[in-house]
Amino acid sequence: MDTQHTLNSLEIDKLRDKITDIRIAMLKTQEADGDFHTRPMATHQMDPDGTMWFFTYDNSNKVAEIRQNNRVALGFSDTGSEVYVSATGRAEVVKDQAKINDLWDDFLKTWFPQGKDDPGISLLKVTIHAGEYWDQPGGKMVKLFAMAKGALTGSADHTNRNEKFGDEPK
């Protein structure tokens, strides 16, 4: 049986800081035949404990895949600020109208034209237990300078940061 690691408050704060301006996550699930399926999902909230919330339809492929194997991966990318985050966790399908009402934003009507009272809407609750980030302190200008320096001197760019948080369940 898996034991699930939970992120500590420092790890949650770092994750929140890295993804706070990234609206779209790439959610990866595993299909019945073992292949992986990745799709974009709008991130709606990150709870204080690190739980993330996404809207979906009950009858979607991702829901069927999560019911077979609830291990998921999330990818976040902001090329403008040179921030990249990968996170893994467990997903569950939640049918909670109060939470749907709480998270609802009218821009969701693009995907859910019947609104928040559509009986086919559910939430995906993803509990993150591990991840990794890469970033470029100072952003693009530092990166461009390091690239120019490397081109002139032949020295490698060591300005990127990479850090892991949490750990995989045993």
Image (cartoon, rainbow, N blue to C red):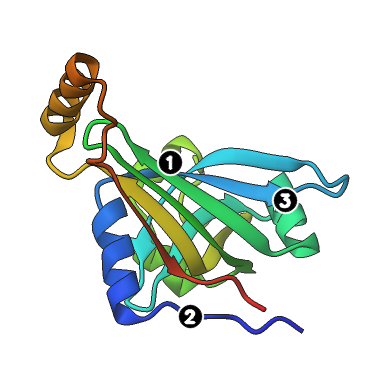
Identify the secondary structure beneath mark 1.
helix
> Can the viewer see residue 118 in this picture?
no
Identify the residue under disc 1: 109
Q: In this view, does 127 lie to the left or right of 36?
A: left
| Residue furthest top as drawn | 152
Q: Quadrant of the N terminus?
A: bottom right
Q: Which amino acid does label 2 sit on?
A: Thr
* Label 2 vs label 3, nearer the camera: 2
| Residue furthest right as drawn | 33
Q: Do the residues labelled 2 and 3 touch (CB within 8 Å)?
A: no
Q: Which residue is drawn at 60% across and 81% down?
A: 4
Q: What residue type is labelled 1?
A: Lys
Q: Earlier in the sequence, mark 2 or mark 1?
A: 2
Q: Which residue is drawn at 31% across and 80% down?
A: 9
Labelled disc at residue 159: none
Identify the residue under disc 2: 6
Q: In this view, does 119 lie to the left or right of 75?
A: right
Q: Are marks 1 and 3 in contact (CB under 8 Å)?
A: no
Give the alpha-carbon distance from disc 2 to disc 3, as whole Å. 29 Å
Identify the secondary structure beneath mark 2.
loop
Query: As displayed, is residue 156 above or below residue 30?
Result: above
Identify the secondary structure beneath mark 3.
loop
Instruction: Give how far across and how far down residue 124 sits, in percent.
Output: 56, 61
- Could you say which is closer to the camera, residue 162 or residue 1? 162
Q: Which amino acid does label 3 sit on?
A: Asn
Instruction: Give how far across and how far down residue 152 sits, in percent.
Output: 18, 15
Instruction: Give how far across and how far down residue 104 sits, in percent.
Output: 38, 57
Q: Residue at x 56, y 66 (%)?
A: 89
Q: Quadrant of the C terminus?
A: bottom right
**Local crowd at mark 2 within 10 Å, few (<14), some, or many (≥20)?**
many
Q: In which quarter of the image is residue 148?
A: top left
Labelled disc at residue 59: 3
